């Protein structure tokens, strides 16, 4: 199944899967520090883990939202993108 999203988001938004620890966490922190993104979506299978990193990013004056999703499941991927569009539109 192919999903095409035609929503326009006026700012750069980063969606980083597996961003609750390790390299993924380092990437979202670097993105937040770069000031090149108006929003960052943190993701982990367990939303609580993603929320901890999202809170850290929000304290850096970069808007962030945590979304839980298992990206091995297509339906979770679709929901992840839909929720990102909804939050940042």
Image (cartoon, grey):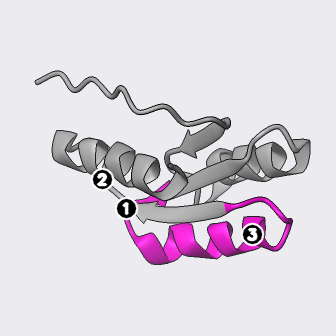
* Quadrant position of the N terminus in the picture: top left
Q: Per the image, is 61 magenta?
A: yes
* 49 w.r.t. 27: above or below: below
Query: Which secondary structure lies at badge 3?
Result: helix
Which residue does the numbered mark 2 point to in the structure image?
Answer: 70
Q: Quick one: 34 or 72, which is closer to the camera? A: 34
**Distance from the alpha carbon under mark 1 to that under mark 2:** 5 Å
Disc with the residue nearer the chain's start (3 vs 2)? 3
* Residue 15: mark in rendering: none
- Residue at 75%, 69% (x, y): give it: 58
73 displayed left or right of 20: left
> Percent position (x, y) of residue 18?
51, 50
Which residue does the numbered mark 1 point to in the structure image?
Answer: 45
10 Å neighbourhood of mark 3: few (<14), some, or many (≥20)? some
- Range covered by the magenta-colored residues: 43-63
47 displayed left or right of 77: right
Q: Confirm or deny contact between disc 1 and disc 3 (CB under 8 A).
A: no
Query: Which secondary structure lies at badge 1?
Result: loop
> Percent position (x, y) of residue 83?
37, 55
Which residue does the numbered mark 3 point to in the structure image?
Answer: 58
- Residue at 72%, 43% (x, y): give it: 27
């Amino acid at each position: 199944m192919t999903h095409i999203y035609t929503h326009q988001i006026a700012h750069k938004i980063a969606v980083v899967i597996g961003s609750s620890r390790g390299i993924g966490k380092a990437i979202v922190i670097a993105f937040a520090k770069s000031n090149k993104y108006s929003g960052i979506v943190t993701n982990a299978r367990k939303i609580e883990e993603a929320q901890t990193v999202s809170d850290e990013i929000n304290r850096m004056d970069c808007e962030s939202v945590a979304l839980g999703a298992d990206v091995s499941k297509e339906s979770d991927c679709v929901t992840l993108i839909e929720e990102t569009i909804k939050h940042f539109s």
